[in-house]
Image: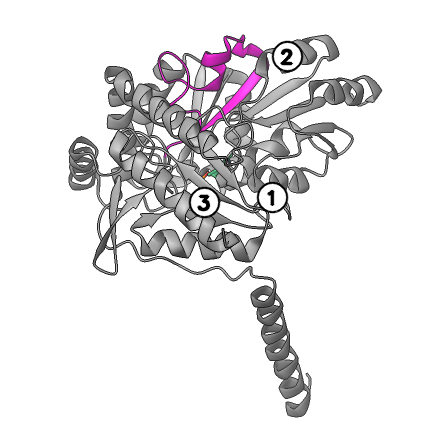
Amino acid sequence: MPGESGLNSRLKLMKSYIKDELRKTYEAGLRRTFIDIEGAQGPRVTVNGRSLLHFSSNDYLTLASDPRLIEAANAATVEFGAGSGASRLVSGNMTPHMALEERLKAFKGTEAVLLFNSGYQANTGVIPVLAGRGDDIFSDRLNHASIIDGIAISRARLSRYPHRDTGALERLLKASTARRKLIITDGVFSMDGTVAPLGDIAELAEKYGAFIYIDDAHGTGVLGAKGRGVVEEAGVDASRTLQMGTLGKALGSFGAFVAGSAGLIELIKNRARSFIFSTSLPPGACGASTAAIDIVESEPERRAAVRENAAYLRKSLLESGFETGESTTQIIPVIIGDAKRVMVMSKKLFKRGFLVQGIRPPTVAKGTERLRITTMSAHTREDINQLANALTEVFNEVTGE
Ligand SMILES: *Cc1c(COP(=O)(O)O)cnc(C)c1O
């Protein structure tokens, strides 16, 4: 047992560590703070009593505040209660979980589906099931943080390839002597709005005997003729893949799922630690998600509007001389390349009535700091015109033009 003075000096060390780390974070322009959204999510939100045009949400199909989702969440909560009380494998497997998995199975057209509590938990739980010590994982450099964490947990050997560079991916696959090879890619890249070259990746997987794990957090509900996501849009055979989709973004609710073969899903159910050791989704979230899938199928005009709005915004940004990378989706980066300047622009947009978040390291690489703009189905052309004008004004202000 340390003496009292030992304890005190350790506490002091901890305090000075916290102070130093915060100071470093602030000085680098990387302080993160909350914005308080006072009402429901939607194309307009209320902050400090002011109505702002919202261009920072992943609620692409404007479903988070849809009366049908709210009604379904209420009905499930009234019938099944507010919480599930345990993990699925203990006593937390309830009718709304089973119903949602059945609905997702029909939607995705795969043999089996398993729910996770979030996309983050899906990635950190599933990747260590797909690969382990002695296996090789090939991961796009711009893959989501939760994929990077899942790979670290897996202890497999990691080879990162430049963003969407299938030539580099092939060289790495060719050089690999591992028994199991796993390619991991975002479907739609979350900070760039680019789409994975799935057709080419599938050919390489076939040629080199690799398996593909696709994180379709941003494609689910938006991409593909039926809204099933990037695999549907690319028209590739899903049998060599495991797809992950989230329920908290375009589907307006909360949670995630993986869709694949019955055998693989059974293995994940038995092995994925974030599935086994975590209390299952509340019934209300499952009810809302089930209602959301019905809407995705019956109202294709929503995903069409998201993408038309994005194309319209991208065009007007390019005409104004902004750098929007290679986005082809509803996620549009406006690359500024400086953390402090990006946050000043975000603040100035806020003052003008727009909610547009600045994105800094470690979310994106240093030098690629950006405003990340997303379109929703309920945005109007007028909303988008206003945003484009405000962006130009704000950019001219910060660059002194
Ligand atoms: C948001 C996101 C996740 C995490 O999903 P949550 O359900 O929000 O935890 C995973 N992968 C990608 C690419 C994402 O954008």
Magenta segment: does it hold 265?
Answer: no
Image position of 78 (left or right of 251): left
* Residue depicted at x 59% and y 11%: 199
Q: Which mark is residue 200?
A: 2
- Residue range corresponding to the magenta coloring: 218-247
Callout in the foreground (1, 3): 1
Name the amino acid, label 2.
Asp
Residue 115 visible in the snapshot = no
Kind of residue at badge 3: Ser
Q: CA distance from mark 2 to mark 3?
A: 36 Å
Q: Which residue is mark 1?
A: 368
Residue 209 image label: none
- Horizontal placement of 245 versus 177: left or right? left
Counting residues from the N terminus, which is met first, the one under dot 2 or under dot 3?
A: 2
Query: Residue 78, image x and y in percent?
Result: 15, 41
Element under disc 3:
loop
- Spatial CA distance of label 2 from label 1 is 27 Å
Direction bottom: furthest residue: 5
Task: Name above or below for residue 108 compared with residue 354.
Answer: above
Q: Quadrant of residue 312?
A: top left
Nearest to N terminus: mark 2 or mark 1: 2
Q: Which secondary structure lies at badge 1?
A: loop
Which mark lies nearer to you, 2 or 3? 2
Residue drawn at x 40%, y 57% is 347
Residue 278: numbered disc: 3
Q: Is residue 281 left or right of residue 19?
A: left
Q: Amino acid at mark 1?
A: Thr
Question: In front here: 219 or 349?
Answer: 349
